[in-house]
Every structure is written in structure tokens, then in C-alpha cells.
Image (cartoon, rainbow, N blue to C red):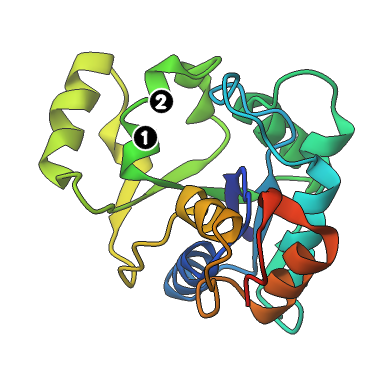
Amino acid sequence: MRLGILGGTFDPIHLGHLRTAEEIGQELDLEKVYLIPSASPPHKTEDPVTLFDHRLTMTRLAIVGSSLLDALDLEGRRAGPSYSIETLKELHSIFKPDPDLFFILGIDAFLEINTWKGYERLFDYAHFVIISRPGYRKEKIEPFLMKSGLDIKTLTLKETTLMDISSTRIREMVQKGKSIRFLVPGAVRDYITEKGLYGKRGNPR
């Protein structure tokens, strides 16, 4: 069972997230790629995060019609900070007996992985698929691995269609009443409008 895992705050989920999940899922011949919104991101303690139920709903709306992508609410059902090590352990208990998990994350997040809880053990539970990001050179990975003592054999570096879209920027645009059309799926855009998310002024269509 080959399964992809793409976690994130998804505040809101956008086309960059979805395109990455789609391309990696197809390239690695994965049966499913699970999008897992973080309920309480431990690295975003100073920034307000939209309620989990809203972010989960937007994620589910975004993937309607996809046979490859799915959403899981694991972290919303777990109390306390959303640690990836706990999520990976739980996934192994759900998808028995021996799932082949591929943990997808950007190079920017990977270069901070030594700040994650139990980061040395993460590689016991999943392969890591590292996605290039604007402004981050892949040449930084090997020195980082040597310094941290992580095993480079557990990693795969992948290029996906470059879509320099930011959830932060989308929230700012909504707040200013600017259009976010073609940055998020239409159903997500409609949900943001309906629920009045991100303190919008005007119509974010």
C-alpha cells in the first residue's frame, strides 16, 4: 500500500498544494495522497489560525472529484499540538499491516526538521519526498543532512510545477477585497465568502 501524506495548515488550501499532491501521487504511483490539515501547528504559536473545521471543510471541497486525493481529520481529533511523529504512528495503526508512506514537504520545511518533535524517528515511519521551493537551493540539503546525522537514503528530491502561491498572501488579498480567482478552487473561494473568513472587505471572487 503506497500512500502519500501532505500535511499543512491549509489556511486556505490553494492550487499549489493540490498540484503538488497530484503530481507526486502520479509520479510515485501512489494509491492515495492524503491531505491532513494541522489542528494546532506547533510552529505557528504566534499567528492566529482559522478554526480547524473551516480548514478541513475547505480541504474536502478542494478535492471533490479527485480519485487520487483524500482528506483526513486525524489531527483535529487529537488533543494538543499537531506533531508529525504522532500522525505517522497513527497512520501505521490505521493502514495495517505495513503501509509504504511517502511524507511530502517543501525544502523550506525540511531544512527546519531538526526543530520537530522526535525528528530522528520520523524516517522510521515514512519515506521523505522533498519539493523544491523558490529561493531555496537543493545544494543545501546534503550539508544539512551531514550536520544533522540524517540518512540521505530515506529522501527523494522532486521538482513539481512551480506555483508560487502563498496562503498568507491569499488571506491578505481577501482582507483587502481583492480577487483570489484562479488561486484557490472555486468551491473554496465560495466557502470563504459564505463564512466571511479572513476579515474580507468586499467580494473575494
Q: Residue at left 74%, top 77%? A: 187
Q: Residue at left 77%, top 45%? A: 97
State the image quarter where residue 118 is shown.
top right
Q: Residue at left 80%, top 42%? A: 52
User: Is residue 135 shown above or below 144?
Assistant: below
Q: Amino acid at mark 1?
A: Phe
Left or right position of 138 against 76: left
For disc 1, the marked residue is 110
Q: Amino acid at mark 2?
A: Ile
Q: Residue 51 — which label?
A: none
User: Is residue 119 shown above or below 155?
Assistant: above
Residue 174: horizontal and vertical position, in percent?
59, 60
For disc 2, the marked residue is 113
For label 1, the SS is: helix
Q: Is residue 93 visible?
A: no
Do the residues bearing badges 2 and 1 touch, measured as CB atoms within 8 Å?
Answer: yes
Q: Is residue 97 visible?
A: yes
